[in-house]
Amino acid sequence: MTARRKLIAGNWKMNGLKADGLDLASDLAGRLKGAGAVAFDMLVCPPFPLLFPVHEAIADSPLALGAQDCHAETSGAHTGDVSPVMLKDAGCRFVILGHSERRADHGETDAEIAAKAVAAHKEGLVAIICVGETEAQRDAGQANAVVSTQLKGSIPKGATAANTVIAYEPVWAIGTGKTATPDDVKAMHAHIRAELDGKVTEPGAVRILYGGSVKPSNAAELMAVDNVDGALVGGASLKADDFWAIGVSCR
Ligand code: PEP
């Protein structure tokens, strides 16, 4: 079996001002530096205005920096958007794409997400491509089909285990306190792994994260599930103690 190092990614969403972000990121960077060898990679994805200051604060640590979205173009007349080359300039190594909040609030399509992923890859960024079904889709028995369609449409040509991470985030579990059961997570992650065949180079080495109300009390159980290669964490990533506890739950 391919060894995949766990990735614990924090999606700060639209939370925190400069002082909060610097405190949180510096705290985590200090813990990572002090901990020596750990069984996980750790990533924080702050709002755009905090990328430069957070990058400076964590530059001498193993804590990685990512953004929450990007545009598919390098520059131009796209008011309010940020390009992958700008993210790279700000010190990012990762970018989250196709989060369900962007799919729902901004109407992002699989094709747009794939185009963003191509642009991100061109700049050497790792694209974290999010997929997941709604509660109604799960209740209707459509979860696997929905996720298959999202994977087919949003993973671009040129995707590899090195430049692409998949995050399975059931929409009904995000920010709700509800989590998928370990059995459901196991089944969906196995389905995703199988679907990666032919879409990504080295499908067995791609990291598949689970996201949806991950917290210290459920992290160890979820992170021990087959094919769960880390977590994408929203709410619990805003508290250094909680986020760190999720990291150290990885074996
Ligand atoms: C997310 O937004 O990606 C997420 C998983 O949020 P939460 O951990 O708060 O459910």
Image (tube, rainbow, N blue to C red):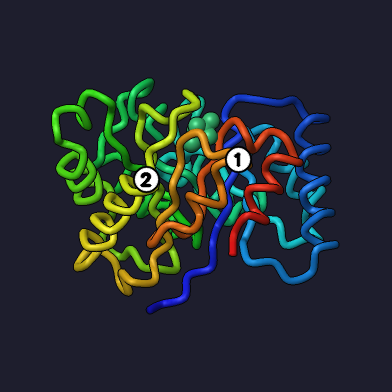
The answer to which of 160 and 229 lies nearer the viewer is: 229
Q: Residues within 10 Å of mark 2 (few under 14, many from 20)?
A: many
The answer to which of 249 and 117 lies nearer the viewer is: 249
Residue at 25% over, 49% down: 151
Establish if 128 lies above or below 196.
Answer: above
Look at mark 1 in the image and give the residue it sits on: 217
Q: Is residue 57 left or right of residue 179?
A: right
Q: Earlier in the sequence, mark 1 or mark 2?
A: 2
Q: Residue furthest bottom?
A: 1
Quadrant in which the C terminus is drawn: bottom right
**Residue 216 position in % (x across, y down):** 63, 42
The answer to which of 27 and 219 lies nearer the viewer is: 219
Quadrant in which the N terminus is drawn: bottom left
Can residue 128 be seen from the camera position used here? Answer: yes
Establish if 240 lies above or below 155.
Answer: above
Residue at 39% over, 62% down: 226
Is disc 2 placed on a helix, strand or loop? strand
Q: CA distance from mark 1 to mark 2?
A: 19 Å
Query: Which amino acid type is marked by label 2?
Result: Tyr
**Residue 79 position in % (x across, y down):** 48, 25
Query: Which amino acid type is marked by label 1?
Result: Ser
Q: Which mark is residue 168?
A: 2
Q: Residue furthest top?
A: 105
The quadrant holding residue 6 is: bottom right
The quadrant holding residue 189 is: bottom left
Residue at 41% over, 77% down: 2
